Image (spheres, grey):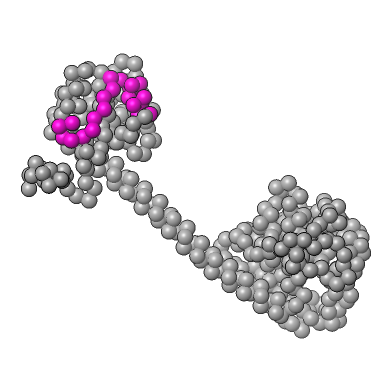
Amino acid sequence: MTRSEEKKRGGNGRGGMFQVGPSDHTILVVEDEEMIRELVAERLRLEGFRVLEAENGKAALSILDREKVDLLLTDINMPVMNGIDLLKEVRGAQDLAVIVMSGQGDLEVAVFAMKAGAHDYIMKPVNFKILIHTIESALKRKMMEQALRDYQHNLEQKVAEQTKIINEFYLRSVQSLVKALEAKDEYTRGHSERVTFYSVEISKRLGGAVDVERVRTAGVLHDLGKIGVPESILNKPSRLTDDEFEVVKKHPLLGVKILEPIEFLRGVFPIILHHHERFDGRGYPSGLKGEKIPLEARVIAVADTFDAMTSTRAYRKALSAEEAIAEIKRCSGTQFDPDIARLFIDIYDSLTLPEGVHLPEGISSPRASEKPQITVKEA
Ligand SMILES: [Fe+2]
């Protein structure tokens, strides 16, 4: 079938995966010599392209500002703004193909134009058969580039969607583990919620020094490793032996090991691992000292200890809030980061406890208010 026959059927004679339909494409012809410009424009119109004309680079830029152009066919030597300067201006416009027209002997300039981002070049005087072929090739290449960009974009979107699904799956698994721990050690549930609440409240007042959402997640998960500590130790009604305490000391690392496959929780691992470090370096598991301990872990440490002290455990009765605050003060600078301890003491009375997060019996303030927002979030 000839091109004219195919045109009668509505085609364009330019088959293949990326069909170039002239009527779908606008070409801007930039040429200072009016006769050549009109000749080229007319010929392209005959081919079915929509054609715009400009006499120099500056006029072309003003057309590009207001018109959607698919292909720029530009001369190089022009007054006001030449083709190379025009090329520099449009470089980076992903949806614009550029062909330069170069006079005889301008081959070096043409090569320079190609390096500057032109898709192709043709020599003057223009051979129209070659010109049409060059235009079709440039448009096809542009369409293929666009298709590739779309494909990559779609691929990235698909990967993001799949990652979200996998993350949600992992989150549900982790939440099941937290529930399992709650069933095993009743104390932990209220404890994790309160530690999360106190830690988040401290974090909010650290002026952006910590990621509040990361602290929230770490608060929920900080004792997850206790799932690997025998119930006989967790609920022992008397003081733990040294050996038993060694088992308890494994829970931060165990928590991290359980969560290790969950890539997006990576940010909370150091917080979980170091929430039992002491500011003076006598804590566990690493004996980190002072600012070597992640700030978020120093926050959790204060909240965790305060709540542990104000809770009745299997082996001892709870302290009052006042007694626990006094203890936090006493251990400031040894067990706790003094800045975090002071901040917690300063805000404790003004805290409003979310509804559903219950204080241990006999502990007054913070007051009850809205629903708690304690969930595991991406960190
Ligand atoms: Fe812990």
Q: Position of residue 113 (x, y in %)?
A: 30, 29
Is 63 included in the stretch rendered in magenta?
yes
- Position above or below: 75 against 354: above
Q: Residue at x 22, y 43 (%)?
A: 20
Q: Residue at x 71, y 70 (%)?
A: 223
Q: Position of residue 245 (x, y in %)?
A: 79, 76
Q: Residue at x 15, y 46 (%)?
A: 11
Quadrant of the rendered image containing residue 295: bottom right
- Where's the C terminus, which quadrant? bottom right
Q: Position of residue 24 (x, y in %)?
A: 25, 40
Q: Which residues are magenta?
A: 45-65
Q: Viewed as shown, does residue 22 lie left or right of 315?
A: left
Is 31 included in the stretch rendered in magenta?
no
The one nearer the camera, 304 or 116, is 304
- The answer to whether residue 1 shows anywhere in this view is yes
Quadrant of the rendered image containing residue 188: bottom right
